[in-house]
Image (cartoon, grey):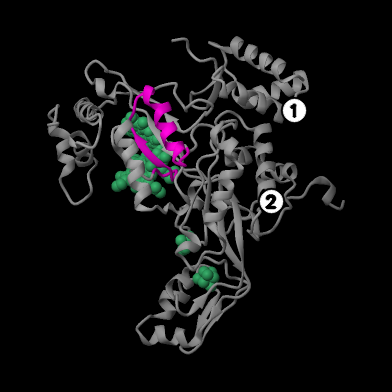
């Protein structure tokens, strides 16, 4: 899958999860593999780009989750 | 700056023989080296109030890292910031310590100067994870302090559901008992698993601790998900003249050595010390007591154990053996490959906040061995005098 397309899918998944059951990075990788046949390495690389750009952030709520950064 | 808040209750903690954190906070509150004394000033105030009310005024908060990182920063806020604005934010930064905790004085000054500039000036050398702990700064300072630290070659450590900063004993740098190079392995693990350290992707935390021998100066057996502990094959080397010297100089070899050997594999007839090495479990007791007379066997390596943790609410879990003996020399591919298989198993089955040891307890050791492709071995003891991992599957049993 094209990297940009994959990033869009991840972003939308995270967007929909906000305020509900958040994803852990591992949950995202499993879902992408099952539903889109994306390998874990690919998913990791895409998530990493989203994090490095600040589009997504990690949070900690008794475990580490992926979220959209709060708007200031 | 003179003390802003009176602190009669916590002043009590300055009394007595032990070092006092209250004294240190007061020093940071008054130090002219610390750029912003308000952190330590208001920390004293808030702490005094907590002692009075018997109630904490810290709350957790979303911040976990700097841009791109999902670990290394532990966010804390005061729940009464109007009263104590200096600690409205009081985040902790974990900095990856050097292997074996060796520093030049220059490096220590550098860390302290950076922290005097951006934070409270308070540090904890070291946290029980092993990291350098820099206590107390505000959100706006996180990116600048990280930029300054990393421009000088420092990096953040692990936190959250990630690989935690690996740590080790001083190893061959200072200790003749090191059965492998703990410093080198710690460095290589840190480099190899950078991604897993900074970008949490596991069900929960994962700690590596490397000890060069069973004396285990890093307490690896009780608090690492993976404990890598040096050991040897072959016979303990005995210098009988030196043994007799110990006896002559007043050591009661029967009581202090032979009777304390946990496997009862030694004997002493007043002239010669004998060891039945087949039964020795390499506990290091005798060698550590008679350093001049006894040396480890010549073929050195390590035992890999899995699964300990030191939780607060339920009891501690000790690591148990999964690889009885492995040669540990660069490039360590065999070890890294094993680690990755274990993580895959954990990723696949682990529940949120379930450590790998708990997962194995839940699913059973046979399932773990099968899925990771580790061969069962009689040395896989879980605790002394208990080996619960003998099992037969249907197809092994002749009917
Ligand atoms: C500003 C507030 C606080 C921050 C930022 C903070 C942060 C931390 C950090 C970073 C560690 C791990 C140190 C390491 O790497 O080993 C830690 C450990 C711990 N904290 Fe806190 N903490 C705070 C307040 C508290 C309070 C108020 C309590 C209890 C009353 C507490 C109890 C503990 C305990 C029991 C440990 C484990 C001890 C250890 O592993 O050595 N913390 N905390
Ligand atoms: C009910 C009381 C206590 C609880 C629940 C508690 C809990 C803990 C925990 C969870 C750790 C971290 C272990 C690890 O993962 O390395 C720890 C470490 C430590 N505790 Fe406690 N503790 C208690 C009392 C004390 C007392 C009374 C002292 C000192 C007199 C103390 C001194 C330490 C020290 C020095 C460490 C660090 C050990 C290391 O770095 O290996 N603790 N404690
Ligand atoms: S664990 Fe063993 S090798 Fe490491 S410093 Fe302690 S005694 Fe030496
Ligand atoms: S190392 Fe431990 S088990 Fe082995 S002979 Fe010495 S005391 Fe006994």
Question: Residue B365, labelled with which disc?
Answer: none
Is residue B259 left or right of B29 when viewed as pictured? right
Location of residue B192 by image quarter: top right
Q: Is residue A43 above or below residue B13?
A: above
Question: Badge 2, how many Cα within 10 Å: few under 14, some, many 20+?
Answer: few
Who's the residue at 48% across and 34% down the image? B159
Question: In the rendered image, which residue does mark 2 sit on?
Answer: B333
Q: Residue furthest right?
A: B399
Who's the residue at 37% across and 22% down the image? B140
Q: CA distance from mark 1 to mark 2?
A: 23 Å
Provide residue B321's location: percent of width, then percent of height: 61, 54
Question: Residue A39, labelled with which disc?
Answer: 1
Q: Is residue B228 above or below residue B71?
A: below
Determine if marks 1 and 2 fall on one subunit: no
Q: Is residue A50 above or below residue B297?
A: above
Provide residue B221's location: percent of width, then percent of height: 51, 52
Provide residue B180's location: percent of width, then percent of height: 57, 61
Q: Quadrant of the C terminus of chain A?
A: top left
Q: Is residue B332 something that shows in the picture?
A: yes
Is residue B368 left or right of B183 when viewed as pictured? right
Question: Badge 1, how many Cα within 10 Å: few under 14, some, many 20+?
Answer: some
Please tell me whether residue B149 belongs to the stretch shown in magenta. Answer: yes
Q: Depth check: B317 or B181 in front? A: B181
Q: Is residue B269 something that shows in the picture?
A: no
Which contiguous range is marked in magenta?
B127-155
Chain of the residue under label 1: A
Q: Secondary structure at mark 2?
A: helix
Provide residue B179's location: percent of width, then percent of height: 56, 64
Please tell me whether residue B228 belongs to the stretch shown in magenta. Answer: no
Q: Secondary structure at mark 1?
A: loop
Chain of the residue under label 2: B
């Amino acid at each position: 899958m094209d990297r940009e397309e994959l990033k869009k899918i991840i972003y939308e998944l995270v967007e929909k999860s906000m305020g509900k059951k958040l994803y852990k990075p591992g949950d995202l990788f499993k879902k992408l593999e099952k539903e889109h046949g994306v390998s874990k390495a690919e998913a990791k690389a895409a998530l990493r780009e989203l994090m490095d750009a600040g589009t997504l952030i990690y949070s900690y709520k008794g475990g580490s989750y992926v979220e959209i950064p709060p708007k200031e | 700056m003179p003390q802003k808040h009176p602190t009669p209750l916590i002043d009590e903690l300055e009394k007595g023989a032990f070092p006092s954190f209250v004294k240190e906070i007061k020093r940071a509150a008054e130090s002219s080296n610390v750029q912003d004394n308000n952190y330590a000033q208001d920390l004293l105030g808030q702490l005094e109030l907590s002692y009075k009310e018997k109630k904490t005024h810290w709350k957790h908060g979303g911040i976990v890292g700097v841009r791109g990182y999902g670990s290394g920063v532990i966010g804390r806020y005061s729940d009464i910031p109007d009263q104590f604005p200096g600690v409205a934010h009081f985040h902790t930064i974990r900095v990856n310590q050097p292997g074996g905790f060796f520093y030049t004085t220059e490096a220590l000054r550098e860390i302290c100067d950076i922290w005097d500039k951006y934070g409270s000036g308070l540090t904890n050398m070291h946290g029980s994870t092993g990291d350098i702990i820099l206590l107390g700064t505000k959100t706006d300072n996180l990116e600048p302090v990280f930029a300054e630290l990393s421009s000088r070659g420092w990096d953040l450590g692990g936190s959250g559901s990630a690989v935690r900063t690996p740590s080790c004993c001083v190893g061959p740098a200072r200790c003749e008992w090191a059965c492998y190079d703990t410093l080198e392995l710690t460095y290589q693990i840190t480099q190899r698993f950078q991604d897993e350290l900074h970008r949490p992707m596991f069900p929960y935390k994962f700690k590596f601790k490397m000890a060069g021998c069973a004396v285990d100066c890093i307490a690896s057996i009780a608090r690492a998900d993976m404990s890598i502990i040096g050991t040897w094959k072959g016979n303990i080397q005995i210098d009988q003249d030196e043994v007799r010297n110990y006896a002559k100089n007043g050591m009661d070899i029967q009581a202090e050595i032979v009777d304390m050997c946990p496997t009862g594999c030694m004997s002493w007839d007043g002239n010669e010390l004998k060891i039945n090495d087949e039964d020795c479990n390499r506990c290091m007791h005798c060698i550590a007591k008679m350093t001049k007379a006894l040396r480890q066997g010549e073929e050195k390596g390590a035992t890999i154990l899995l699964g300990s943790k030191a939780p607060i609410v339920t009891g501690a879990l000790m690591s148990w053996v999964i690889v009885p003996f492995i040669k540990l020399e660069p490039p360590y591919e065999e070890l890294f490959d094993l680690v990755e298989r274990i993580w895959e198993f954990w990723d696949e089955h682990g529940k949120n906040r379930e450590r790998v040891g708990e997962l194995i307890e839940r699913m059973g050791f046979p399932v773990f061995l099968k899925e990771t492709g580790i061969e069962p071995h009689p040395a896989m003891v879980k605790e002394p005098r208990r080996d619960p991992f003998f099992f037969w599957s249907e197809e092994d049993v002749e009917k």
